[in-house]
Image (cartoon, grey):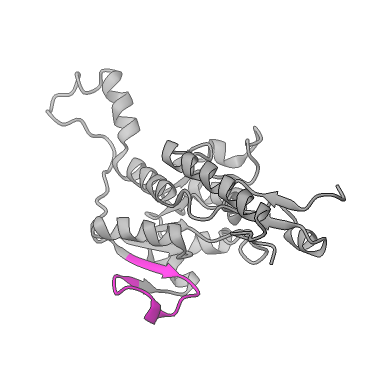
């Protein structure tokens, strides 16, 4: 496509484009930052609350009649986990990571982050930690970093082995941040308690993806970004990016 001059990615992540090659050919590549920040943070806690409160499970059990058959007013056959005072570790503290942190603070959680930011740049409620410390000390680890060659496979067998057997992994970032076989092995062996993921390395997943049959692995089909409000912002920003390029003043350029 020798006439190609502009690529407008309809997402925040732009790893679907060879940006270096585009830059070399003078092609402008833009993305759409921050359009789904609150929606993704909301999904982080949808997964956390599903795992800790088992809302879906208990609703199904009630409809099966198990509460009706209960001798007690309260039917409960799984642990319920309070979030207050639990430690959540955020890998990456951009827009989504920071919004997730604010929600966690609202739940009374202790918030830690692995981030390039200086501790002096962080609000007092967020404490900086090294990556391996975050895996070993936190009750919940949530991924909010971009996919790069350095972060690909960041969650692997070695780091999963650092986690507590009661800990939870959340990934609403990018599927390849996680070695899926290593995560499945950790779940099935009880090295960690549960995982909530909205993204996989291949989407839609292959039938043999090990996470599809892993114990306590809750998967949503890459919908964290897709609230109605976020989709409306996406379209408006995409149109704005294209108009800015036509006007000779491109915005949100990632191919600089």
Give me the residue at 80% from left, 60% from top: 21
| Residue bounds of the magenta highlight | 111-126
* Quarter of the figure that contains the C terminus: bottom right
* Residue 82 can be seen in this image: yes
**Residue sitting farthest toward the front:** 247
Q: Which of 125 and 161 is in front in this view?
A: 125
Q: Which of 128 and 38 is in front in this view?
A: 38
Give me the residue at 44% from left, 80% from top: 118
Up-down relation of residue 49 to residue 28 (above or below): above
**Residue 5 image position (x, y, % from top left):** 77, 53
Give me the residue at 73% from left, 59% from top: 19
Location of residue 178 (image quadrant): bottom right
**Residue sitting farthest toward the right:** 2
Q: In this view, does 177 lie to the left or right of 1?
A: left
**Residue 153 image position (x, y, % from top left):** 62, 58
Q: Nearer the viewer, residue 19 or 135?
A: 19
Up-down relation of residue 130 to residue 29 (above or below): below
């Amino acid at each position: 496509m020798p006439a190609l001059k502009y690529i407008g990615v309809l997402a925040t992540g732009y790893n679907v484009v060879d940006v270096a090659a585009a830059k070399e050919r003078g092609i402008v590549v833009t993305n759409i930052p921050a359009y789904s920040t609150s929606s993704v943070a909301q999904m982080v806690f949808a997964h956390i609350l599903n795992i800790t409160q088992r809302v879906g499970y208990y609703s199904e059990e009630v409809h099966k009649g198990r509460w009706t058959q209960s001798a007690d007013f309260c039917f409960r056959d799984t642990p319920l986990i309070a979030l207050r005072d639990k430690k959540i570790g955020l890998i990456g503290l951009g827009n989504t990571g920071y919004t997730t942190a604010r929600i966690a603070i609202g739940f009374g959680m202790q918030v830690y982050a692995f981030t390039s930011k200086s501790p002096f740049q962080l609000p007092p409620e967020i404490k900086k930690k090294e990556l391996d410390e975050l895996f070993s000390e936190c009750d919940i680890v949530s991924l909010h970093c971009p996919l790069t060659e350095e972060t690909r496979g960041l969650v692997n067998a070695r780091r999963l082995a650092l986690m507590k057997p009661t800990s939870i992994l959340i990934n609403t970032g990018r599927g390849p941040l996680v070695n899926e076989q290593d995560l499945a092995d950790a779940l099935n062996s009880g090295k960690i308690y549960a995982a909530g993921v909205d993204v996989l390395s291949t989407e839609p997943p292959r039938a043999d993806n090990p996470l599809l049959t892993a114990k306590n692995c809750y998967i949503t089909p890459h919908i964290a970004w897709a609230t109605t409000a976020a989709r409306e912002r996406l379209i408006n920003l995409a149109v704005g990016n294209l108009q800015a390029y036509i006007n000779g003043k491109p915005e949100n350029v990632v191919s600089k």
